[in-house]
Image (cartoon, rainbow, N blue to C red):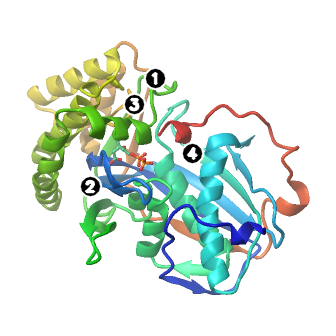
Amino acid sequence: MTRWCKPMAQEIPLEGFEPIDRPAAATARACSNVALVKYWGKVDEQRRVPATGSLSVTLGGLTTETTVAFSDREGPDLVVLDGRHIGGREGARVSIFLDMIRSVSLLHRLPIGAASVRSANYFPTAAGLASSASGFAALAGAAVRAAGMKASFDTLSNLARLGSASAARSVHGGFVELVPFKRENGSWDARTSPVASENHWDLRVLVSVVDAGYKPLGSTPAMARTAATSPYYDGWLGSWGKDLAEAHEAIAARDLERLASIVEHSALKLHALTMTSRPPVQFLRGPSIELMHTVWDLRSSGTLCAFTADAGPNIKVLCSPSDEERVRAALMSVNGVQSVQATAVGGPIDVVAHDVDPAGSWRTMSADNVEKDAEPSSSERD
Ligand code: DP6
């Protein structure tokens, strides 16, 4: 059976792809994002439909650049991340994602074979930060174009979500909402909408790295455990609508004080959920908590800033550009903080087609000339 006739594990979004010329390769650059109002838990595991709405800010300084080339032959995909060959569970997750694009392509009578994927994360040094958001957004953009198709941001966003839900938000720039909804047939789906562009509000996000090591558990299994065991999960499901509405108002008014209150509330609720799961999942470390106190101290002495934390110990702090240096100095003074890097609000995905494959993938690349036995990358830990 050829690679492109593989039965799909999940329902494929077939709409919204338009055949155009097929280039030798395509490159996409996508920014990571951090949720100001968090998603945690799914209503449809297979199609990665979040159980709660979320709203993120795009992180301009944390990007993934991915180049994809498809051959005409079947065979295993070759996936290289930061110069290392990616196999195992993580490689399979990429190939399953590419199978969707192969199926859509086949539908348009444009069969394509195995892919070569080269991806690089441009993140703060040793950050150990979530990369599945920018990773699957860039993969979606590059692979669709390399397959000889084009698609709107909304279509790319729906596709990216099937790789990792937070990736749906990384297709757009600025402030982006991702909300679940029920279709007429009773099935669940989700849509992203840009809330405000990257030029709407000049904010800084300071990424404070506490521990670049591996998380105790990835987001996908951790949220499934939370949904099944935390006594607070129902409260979480019942309160996101209010959080989202408040965040919308604060962003529209560029009101950092108001945004601070909702951003911290959402992050702390998420961590309360994981801590009260059975067995518990504690993503935060000692310095993470110290950083939260530092942010509160800064606020009570008149410097407006707000923290958030995802499924890991690193803390991201929002502030205005004029307070960046003061906030950075305070964060750096906390014991256990390894680095603090500031980023501005980032823009949407950028996709470029190449007449000649810049990586020369099918001439020069084989699984033998890249480093093997990669450690699980940060995206595996997301
Ligand atoms: C805490 O999108 O990484 O960052 O959809 O299972 O791949 P999967 O999970 P992922 O989870 C992100 C969780 C979060 C909150 C958020 O980004 O909204």
Q: Residues within 10 Å of mark 3 (few under 14, many from 20)?
A: many
Q: Which residue is mark 1?
A: 211
Residue 360 appears in the rendering: no
Residue 135 shown left or right of residue 338 in the figure? right
Q: Is label 1 within 8 A of ligand 1 (CB to nearest ligand atom)? A: no
Q: CA distance from mark 4 to mark 1?
A: 18 Å
Q: Which residue is mark 3?
A: 312
Q: Is label 2 within 8 A of ligand 1 (CB to nearest ligand atom)? A: no
Q: Amino acid at mark 1?
A: Asp
Residue contact at pointers 4 and 1, CB within 8 angstroms? no
Quick one: label 4 or label 1, which is nearer the N terminus? 4
Q: Which residue is mark 2?
A: 55
Residue contact at pointers 3 and 2, CB within 8 angstroms? no
Say which residue appears at 71% left-offset and 34% top-offset. Answer: 374
Q: Which residue is mark 4?
A: 122
Q: Amino acid at mark 2?
A: Leu
Percent x, y of residue 327 = 27, 30
Q: CA distance from mark 3 to mark 4?
A: 19 Å
Residue contact at pointers 1 and 3, CB within 8 angstroms? yes
Q: Amino acid at mark 3?
A: Gly
Where disc 2 sits, the SS reads strand
Q: Is residue 177 above or below residue 92?
A: below
